Image (cartoon, rainbow, N blue to C red):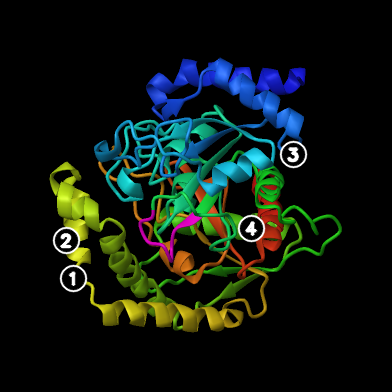
Amino acid sequence: MSAAARDALVGALDAIAAGDAELKAFVALHGHEHAGRELERALAHGGALRGLPIGVKDIFDTAALPTSYGSPLYAGHRPRADAAIVQAIRRAGGVVVGKTSTTEFAYLNPTPTRNPRAPGRTPGGSSAGSAAAVAAGLLPLAVGTQTGGSVIRPASYCGVVGFKPTYGALPTPGLKPFSWSLDTVGLFTANVTHMAAYGAAISGQGWHAAAAGARMPVFGIAWTYPWEALSPSARRVLETARRQLQAAGATVRDVDLPAWIDPVFRAHDAVQGWEAARALADEHAFHADQLSPVLRAYLADARQVTDAAYEAGLAQAAMARSQLAQLFEGIDVLLTPAAPDEPPAGFGSTGASSFNRAWTLLHVPCLTVPGATGVNGLPMGVQVIAPIRAEALCLRAGAVLEGALAA
């Protein structure tokens, strides 16, 4: 067994044991013995991850660890098979060491997880545990999901890299669905280089390729949004990104969002609501008293979304995807805030997904790049958006932006 891989695994488990009582990022963990056996298997099988310790959001099925989906309804639940993303991690040579906390069924009811980069403020949601575990240095890689903004936003709040690739680029079977045409598997890492390497290993796609020697991407920045005005913090981070990118020699252009972005933003609610009402129909019909008030009320409202509104939302999204070239005319990637503001104070909310949900419905890859701060000096990321299936471009542009912000 590789001594370095063994040391990394033991170090991660020891760090979690020492730090998670306060952080509360994990809901289930393997012991050293089981993790050691998994490491032996990973190294014997091979794979680019070489025994890398990984956390997986507790919205995915795991046969060797309980899966509660963030709900007391499923306390102690033990699925018979692993989710497809867990299988992909194993094939790539990774070792799943534990399950990270999720909000209830990946909706809005907050988890106990704390934000290691902004004490007293939310880590975001629904992938709170995954973002916090990477931010605290407990793991180099964690898996999350995004239906509205549940990867990009917590990455912004916790000051880490969050990647939501193209819808379906990472497998969803074995994921407890909330909205099946929106639910997207995403990843958290400490930097963009690791994201490209680890994401390529798990996906089996060349996300880390075509970077060396490639031309500098052209960046666009949108300053006006139909859903809300930029907060002072959001404006500050975009101005910082523009200034630092230009200093690094990049071309940065101001852009106007297409007129169809507003109806796409509004269509997200209808699509998510109609599907969520059906994905959680049994839980709501038979166990409503065991759901949080916020989820119970949401599902009651979601049942009122008509078939016609749902079909119109899907049609609006399809139309906009067919016109994405309009969004990227004259630029390679678009920059927006990753979240509306710095992480909100307190733990009663996971924040708002207003700068994420349209892009989730459009199925485009999005990347949170940390390194900037809001007006109070708290973490705030820049969101890099690329065309559908242009993960390598998104990550390459993210690496350029990361380097510029660091400079």
Q: Is residue 183 magenta?
A: yes
Q: Position of residue 218 (x, y in %)?
A: 70, 68
Q: Secondary structure at mark 1?
A: loop
> In this orientation, does residue 371 appear?
no
Q: Position of residue 30 (x, y in %)?
A: 50, 23
- Between the C-alphas of marks 4 and 1, the distance is 47 Å
**Which circle marks residue 401 in the picture?**
none
Which element type, helix, strand or loop, lies under badge 2? Answer: helix
Which residue type does callout 3 highlight?
Gly
Tell me the CA gap for discs 1 and 3: 48 Å
Can you identify the residue that label 1 sits on?
Answer: 304
Locate residue 280 relative to residue 193 in the image: left or right. Answer: left
Q: Position of residue 189 (x, y in %)?
A: 60, 41
Amino acid tagged 4: Arg
Q: Secondary structure at mark 4?
A: helix
Which corner quadrant holds the C terminus?
Answer: top right
Q: Earlier in the sequence, mark 2 or mark 3?
A: 3
CA gap between label 3 and label 4 equals 40 Å
User: How far separated are the C-alphas under marks 2 and 4?
Assistant: 47 Å
Residue at mark 3: 47
Q: Main secondary structure of the magenta part?
A: loop
**What whole-number distance in Å separates the C-alpha atoms at marks 1 and 2?**
7 Å
Region rendered in magenta: 177-184
Viewer-side label of 1, 3? 3
Residue 300 image label: 2
Residue at mark 4: 243
